[in-house]
Amino acid sequence: MATVLEFEKPIIEIQEKIEELKKMSLESGMDLNKDITLLEQEAEEFKKELFANLDPTQKMQIARHPERPNFMDYVNLISTDFVELHGDRVGTDDRAIVGGLAKIDGKPVMIIGTMKGKSTKENLEYNFGMPQPEGYRKALRLFKHANKFNIPIVTIIDTPGAYPGISAEEHAQGAAIATNLREMQKLGVPVIAIISGEGCSGGALGLAVANKVYMLEHAYYTVISPEGCASILWRDASKNLEAATALKITAPDLMEFGIVDGDIKEPTRGAHTNYEEMAANLKQTILNALNELSGLSCEDLRNQRYDKFRKMGAFLE
């Protein structure tokens, strides 16, 4: 059974009433088509209004939906000839970051992303989408490989953050992410980053120093999770709505600040309700960005990326 979010329950209740009326009409022979049509129209209008006015925490619930498409779902739907490249060349293959060569509409790309599972077993394999330092070093190896052979890079990011455990700190988590930030800036190929679900902290930014940064409509991108922020500021994680509102984590706010370049429309109730429609919108955005960036020289790409990130955090005295 599909997971129903708390704020979606009124929609489900209306749908259940519609099904009851259809069953009653069939069993009794009564003509209830007018009532059914009216309820269906009301349900559709209510759904559109609800999802057009979601607060940041409701968007977070959609971004964290257990059935939301993961990295490999997108790879399989938008690309062909995917060849996964494993390992950091030091001895570890962190499964929380997956990447390899592929073609999108015949165009070669290096596609890299954080990976979440759909079951407990898969989530344990992918460490719930939280990369270790070895994962960032694997990603860096693939970035450099793409740069050497002049292949555009696409990253798809859905992570609650880099793994915060002791083992990660012992293996220099902060240094691994910082190195990626520095080295991604030096790349002479187009880099496109997409926040497809959760985009938290340096764990997301370690794959997102890009010429173009996009977000899915119901994704969120933030320096810290709203629950973590609320726990620090108010000692109360339940104040996550206040924190999320102050953090400006949604696409419209981040577009206004110049943090992201655009949002990618999702199916009405979220990406998890129609993988094919979501993948088609994602693919078109990538192709448009590749076409826009293809005419820039290596130096122009580096300068554009540098200028983009230098403008962030502007303030007035």
Image (tube, rainbow, N blue to C red):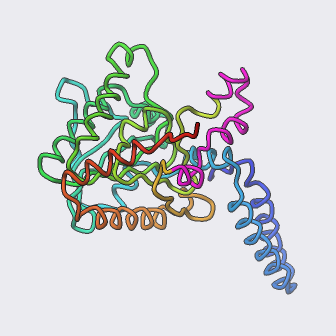
In the picture provided, is 77 more to the left or to the right than 220? left
Q: Nearer the viewer, residue 254 or 196?
A: 254
- Vertical side of 96 occupied by 17: above or below: below
Q: Determine if the magenta segment contains residue 255.
A: yes
- Vertical side of 130 occupied by 193: above or below: below
Q: Position of residue 101 (x, y in %)?
A: 21, 51
The quarter of the picture where the C terminus appears is top right
Q: How many marks?
A: 0
Q: Residue at x 34, y 57 (%)?
A: 76
Q: Residue at x 44, y 48 (%)?
A: 70
Q: Nearer the viewer, residue 217 or 103?
A: 217
Q: Residue at x 77, y 67 (%)?
A: 46
In the picture provided, is 104 more to the left or to the right than 198? left
Q: Determine if the magenta segment contains residue 153.
A: no
- What is the magenta segment's predominant secondary structure? helix
Q: Position of residue 280 (x, y in %)?
A: 42, 67
Q: Position of residue 95 (x, y in %)?
A: 33, 34
- Vertical side of 279 occupied by 141: above or below: above
Q: Residue at x 83, y 73 (%)?
A: 21
Residue range in magenta is: 228-257
- Vertical side of 269 occupied by 174: above or below: above
Residue at the outermost front position = 317
